[in-house]
Image: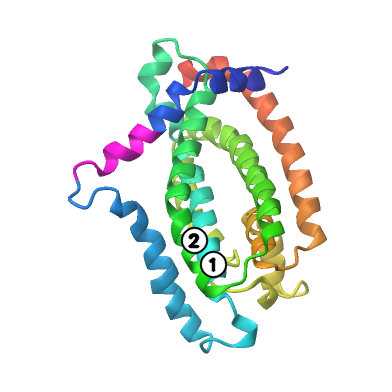
Amino acid sequence: MSLLFRHLAESFRKPDHWLYASWLDVITKYRKNALGLFWIFFPPIVYIWGLGLFFRAIRGGITPDDAGFLAHMGFGFIIFRLMSTMIMDVGNSFSAYLPYIHEGHLRLTDYILRPLARSVIYFMFAVPLLVIVLVGDAPVLPLGILWALLGFIAVLVNLFLYGTLLAFIGARFPDVNQFFSNVMLALFLITPIVWFSKDAPADSVHGALMRGNPFHHLLAVVRDPVLGAPIEPMTYAYLGVMTVAGFVLASVVYGRLAKRMPAWL
């Protein structure tokens, strides 16, 4: 077993450094606000029923082709928020917990799992809102929920694997963290969230950008089964290659660079 997966197994046996701590991060962030944890619900509400209704009106209102647009956009935003929050936070993970590393807590998987757990907590708070918009705007396929759960596991696995790579890159080259933050806006625009994937034919530049975007494929395997939308075979092939490559790269990078991390910081 590689060093990465040995440390990962230890992290799951001792979750106090990442699971409990990430929950405390969320609670303490909103503790001093008058509305408290309500602010966790505010972004999804704004995007689903604020921007969602706005973009639906731009598309011409409710038409047979646009049925379920609020569910499509709400699902897309919540999953994309999960992924983008992890990507933007993980680059600073090692430097943010530098005192723990210098004290000898060298199981670096804890610092990668912490932003991932925090992102999942935000996602779980948004699930009730997602249920409301799904019930009110689109028929839900019960079997699709099972496939969506499997897709969600694939998303978490890839976020951890590529989060491991980004954590080392961000620790070695701190300026790259600004790049991560800025590039997410461009990725949001080429991910089918405020528009449907059918609007981007495969033979168009728009379609090529969408199909080359990993966030599109990660989103599709979670959202599309629930909404009954077809998933392109390319998506499964793309995610298969992406996951295998992530396993190999993360394992090699972690094994070679984990012991050098304290010196970098």
Residue at mark 2: 130
Q: Visible in this render: residue 265? A: no
**Amino acid under disc 2:** Leu
**31 or 7: nearer the viewer:** 31
Residue 114: x and y in percent read 46, 32
Q: Which residue is drawn at 69% across and 46% down?
A: 150
Q: Which residues are drawn in magenta? A: 23-32
* Tag 1: amino acid: Leu
x, y percent for residue 26: 34, 40
**Where is residue 202, by image quadrant?**
bottom right
Q: Distance between the residues labelled 2 and 1?
A: 6 Å
Using the image, determine if residue 119 lies above or below residue 182. Answer: above
Give the label on residue 134, or none: 1
* Quarter of the figure with the N terminus: top right
SS class, disc 2:
helix
Q: Where is residue 36 in the image (x, y as percent from the top left)?
A: 24, 48
